[in-house]
Image: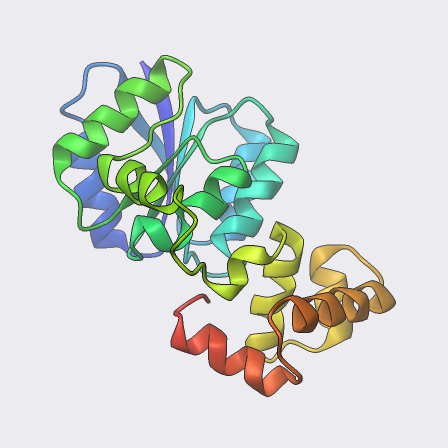
Amino acid sequence: MKKVLIADDHAIFREGLKRLIAKTVDFVVSHEAADGIEALKKVQELEFDLVILDISIPGRSGLEVLMDIRKIRPKLPVLIMSMYPAEQFALRAYKAGAAGYLTKGGAANELFDALSRIALGKRYVSQVLAEALADGLGGDNEKPLHDELSIREYQVLCKIAGGVKPQQIADELGMGVKTVGTYRARILQKMRMKSNAELTRYVLENSLS
């Protein structure tokens, strides 16, 4: 049986997910985590075949936790689950190394399909996301401004919008304060904005944090 770690701060959701996974033949939920720090600790100390990670998990953003897991266990697949639509966050999650992306409002058979593909060492891309990506290939659709940001720039953007001070951003992301300033300048330039207030408003309006 393949061992699964569920990292989500909602106990009821974790329990429901456990019951669904119990219906599969190959997977069993062996451990749970309620925040990003606990999830990383368990990934460091224990062996898993799959992590199911909430993108909005407390402590650190899901994308940060995902990137840290990739550093600790490069071959450990991570399935991202989120309340946000796939077209909003999935591409960024895949770029960060996710093995799949599911919305929490999806059908149970989507979870089973994702688990099946991931068990074969493949990535899972939902039909909705596949169609969204195909629609975007024409180049006529206007992309969101934050799509121009690198993963690191995106992380700094969310920290700034959350009111985190430069020194704290530097400490949390493992960089110097001057580097944080450089990232901020790049973000403002790419998003054609002039202040932290504008960045914060954009993040809130687009439900990015």
Tell me residue 23's x, y (percent).
13, 24
Tell me residue 29's x, y (percent).
30, 30
**Residue 108: which quarter of the image?**
top left
Number of marks: 0
The residue lying at 36 percent from left, 12 percent from top is 120
Q: Compare residues 120 and 72 and report the one nearer the observer.
A: 120
Q: Compare residues 66 and 195 and report the one nearer the observer.
A: 195
**Horizontal relation, residue 188 to residue 180: left or right:** left
**Residue 122: which quarter of the image?**
top left
**Residue 21: which quarter of the image?**
top left
The residue lying at 36 percent from left, 41 percent from top is 133
Tell me residue 153's x, y (percent).
65, 59
In the rendered image, the quadrant that contains the N terminus is: top left
Q: Compare residues 67 and 46 and report the one nearer the observer.
A: 67
- In the image, residue 161 sits, relative to residue 106, either above or below, namely below
The residue lying at 60 percent from left, 70 percent from top is 191
**Horizontal relation, residue 152 to residue 35: left or right:** right
- In the image, residue 177 sits, relative to residue 201, either above or below, namely above
